[in-house]
Image (cartoon, rainbow, N blue to C red):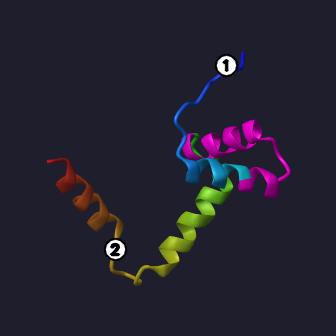
Amino acid sequence: MPTTLTLKNIPDEVYERLKSSAEAHRRSMNSEAIVCLEAALLPARVAPAERLARARELRATLPRGKFRPRDIDAMKREGRS
């Protein structure tokens, strides 16, 4: 069930930015505040396929042959000691 939250002592600059953003997105101040809070506080959900694609892109940027699986395993073990 949604909860009501009252904010006090909002700095003028923050209030004006929220107001401008709400107007730009054609939302109420309340809706804009919720969107901003969700963006700041909730982790972004990334689909497994997208996460895998990112990992493959990063791997492709690494120099070939520099990081072999056994070297990676050794580095992992070092980090755990």
Residue lying furthest right in this view? Answer: 26
Front residue of 74 and 48 = 48
Callout 1, which amino acid? Thr
Point 80% across, 41% down: residue = 28
Taking the image as shown, residue 1 lies to the left or right of residue 73, namely right
> What residue type is disc 2 on?
Phe
Q: What x and y, as percent, mark residue 8?
A: 55, 31
Q: Position of residue 76 (x, y in %)?
A: 26, 55
Q: Give the residue pinned by disc 1.
A: 3
Q: Is residue 52 magenta?
A: no
Residue under pointer 2:
67
Badge 1: residue crowd in 10 Å (few <14, some 14–19, many ≥20): few
| Residue at (72% x, 55% y) in the render | 21
How crowded is the residue under tag 2: few (<14 C-alpha within 10 Å), some, or many (20+)? Answer: few
Quadrant occupied by the N terminus: top right
Depth order, front residue of 69/12: 12
User: Which mark sits nearer the N-terminus, 1 or 2?
Assistant: 1
Give residue 40's position: percent from left, percent from top: 56, 46
Q: Residue at x 64, y 55 (%)?
A: 17
